[in-house]
Image (cartoon, rainbow, N blue to C red):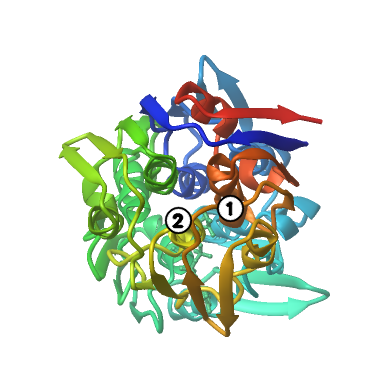
């Protein structure tokens, strides 16, 4: 499958932002800790969400996509997560914490790396070990024994999102035990996971700050949950509006989750109005380059918007230096952008972008999820026909991206 884009149109209109992929995935994992019915409302069919739900179903959960919601019930019949899907779906590692929490044992396939880096789990394992969990490794499998666990004070060596979520879940059902997670990640998706766990009867305090406290409880009950808007998808659409020109309105997004991007867009020349649950962007002039962009853990500029922002710099006036501090291989899209006439030089974790007045249409291929989204943005501004293939990468984290952009006036079609 590929997108065929006829670039050059300005974008006008309104979009409702879908629920956040990176909150839904750990929340699906967390539902393993409860045998009663959990309903995740208004669920976008991201490929990663479909795959995560399929893993739960293989483990024995009852899964139903009904009336736009995901309904999960029942209990797993196996604590061995050994399947091909877990090699490709990085977020399946989140199930380690939830399965251990409830069943005190688990066997996992060692998760693979992916397009943007090695993706180790040493920080996850170091934290889980502090809870008394024993790990043995053989034949590319991880054997987890949590027959004897204890609350603990855990200081993460790096504020890893996944490690924070895994340790939060692992300690949720350690009845009577108190766990303190220090130097934890502060992403809004973690706050959403804590909100979901607490709605099920858990006791997680401090999510969104650098220290989280979990008071273990005996049991969780079912709940229904509506997730926050996806800040990365929203940021991608804002960058699309800035690059194409026009006026777009995004509903269902809290601008507080995108402040570093909003500052960059304003400094680039865009008019942006902020409301509690809405962002309006307007731009009708050539963008000015952002001289220095450095990705950081939340609340800094998010690594997941680095590729879309890099593409925006390719047509901005001036020179931009982008420093990717989070992942070691997140500039793969550069080779494809150079085919479109972009002027980019990469050295280790730095990309230097000299803005050009226009990009050329071309046939390009997605290297990863966010790089793929960046290529779509490049196609939207390159006058002529651009083809973006390998779009399964994009569909992992954007739902109906072509339809969303088409509704704003872009000429984009999905074809075999
Ligand atoms: C989550 O990945 C997100 N995925 C990523 O989004 C996001 O880019 C990332 O957080 C950072 O915000 C989901 O939530 C499903 P990390 P995660 O653990 O948890 C290193 C997207 O595009 N590290 O915070 O895997 C790691 O290699 C995806 O939607 C260790 O060294 O991110 C990386 O360099 C991509 N050891 C850095 O920390 C560990 O044990 C950040 O990783 C864990 C991580």
Q: Is residue 203 visible?
A: no
x and y percentages locating residue 214 in the rendered image = 29, 62
Which residue is drawn at the image coordinates 53% and 29% (left, top)? 410
Query: Residue 61 or 146: which is nearer the viewer?
Result: 61
Task: Tell me the quadrant of the picture where the N terminus can be found.
Answer: top right
**42 relative to 143 in the view: left or right:** left
297 in relation to 410, above or below: below
At mark 2, the secondary structure is helix
Query: Residue 111 or 383: which is nearer the viewer?
Result: 383
At mark 1, the secondary structure is loop
Task: Tell me the quadrant of the picture where the C terminus can be found.
Answer: top right
Q: Residue furthest top?
A: 67
23 in relation to 321, above or below: above
Which residue is drawn at the image coordinates 72% and 49% (left, top)? 362
- N-terminal-most mark, 1 or 2: 2
x and y percentages locating residue 118 in the rendered image = 65, 75
Q: Is residue 50 visible?
A: yes
Q: Quadrant of residue 183?
A: bottom left
**332 relative to 25 in the view: left or right:** right
Q: Quadrant of residue 252?
A: top left
Which of the two discs, 1 and 2, sits closer to the camera?
Answer: 1
Query: Residue 295 or 123: which is nearer the viewer?
Result: 295
**Is the CB atom of the residue marked by disc 1 within 8 angstroms of ligand 1's nearest atom?**
no
The numbered dot on residue 359 is 1
Which residue is drawn at the image coordinates 33% and 53% (left, top)? 217
x and y percentages locating residue 366 in the rendered image = 69, 53
| Real-space Cα separation, disc 1 to disc 2, in angstroms | 11 Å
Q: Which residue lies under the disc numbered 2?
A: 312
x and y percentages locating residue 32 in the rendered image = 53, 44
């Amino acid at each position: 499958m590929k997108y065929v884009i006829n670039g050059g149109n300005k974008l006008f209109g309104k979009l409702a932002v879908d629920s956040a992929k990176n909150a839904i995935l750990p929340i699906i994992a967390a539902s393993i800790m409860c045998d009663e019915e959990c309903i995740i409302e208004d669920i976008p069919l991201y490929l990663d969400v479909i795959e995560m739900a399929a893993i739960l179903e293989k483990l024995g959960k009852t899964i139903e996509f009904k009336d736009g919601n995901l309904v999960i019930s029942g209990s797993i019949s196996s604590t061995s997560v050994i399947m091909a899907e877990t090699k490709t779906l990085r977020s399946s590692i989140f199930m380690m914490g939830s399965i251990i929490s409830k069943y005190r044992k688990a066997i996992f396939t060692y998760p693979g790396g992916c397009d943007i880096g090695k993706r180790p789990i040493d920080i996850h394992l170091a934290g889980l070990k502090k809870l008394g969990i024993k790990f043995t490794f053989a034949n590319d499998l991880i054997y987890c024994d949590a027959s004897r666990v204890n609350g603990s004070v855990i200081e993460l060596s790096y504020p890893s999102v996944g490690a924070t979520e895994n340790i939060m879940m692992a300690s949720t059902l350690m009845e009577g035990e108190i766990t303190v997670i220090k130097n934890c990640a502060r992403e809004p998706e973690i706050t959403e996971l804590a909100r979901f766990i607490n709605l099920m009867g858990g006791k997680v305090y401090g999510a969104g700050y650098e220290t989280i406290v979990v008071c273990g409880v005996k049991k969780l009950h079912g709940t229904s949950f509506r997730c926050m808007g996806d800040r990365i998808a929203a940021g991608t659409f804002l960058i699309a509006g800035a690059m194409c020109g026009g006026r777009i309105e995004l509903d269902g997004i809290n601008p507080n989750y995108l402040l570093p991007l909003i500052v960059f867009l304003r400094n680039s020349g865009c008019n942006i109005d902020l409301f509690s649950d809405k962002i309006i962007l307007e731009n009708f002039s050539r963008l000015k380059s952002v001289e220095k962009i450095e990705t950081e853990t939340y609340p800094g500029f998010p690594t997941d918007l680095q590729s879309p922002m890099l593409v925006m710099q390719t047509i901005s006036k001036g020179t931009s230096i982008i420093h990717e501090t989070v992942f070691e291989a997140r500039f793969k899209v550069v080779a494809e952008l150079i085919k479109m006439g972009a002027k980019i030089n990469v050295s280790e974790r730095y990309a230097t972008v000299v803005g050009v007045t226009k990009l050329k249409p071309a046939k390009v291929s997605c290297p990863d999820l966010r790089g793929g989204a960046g290529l779509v943005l490049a196609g939207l501004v390159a006058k002529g026909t651009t083809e973006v293939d390998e779009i399964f990468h994009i569909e992992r984290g954007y739902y109906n991206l072509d339809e969303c952009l088409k509704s704003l006036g872009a000429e984009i079609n999905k074809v075999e």
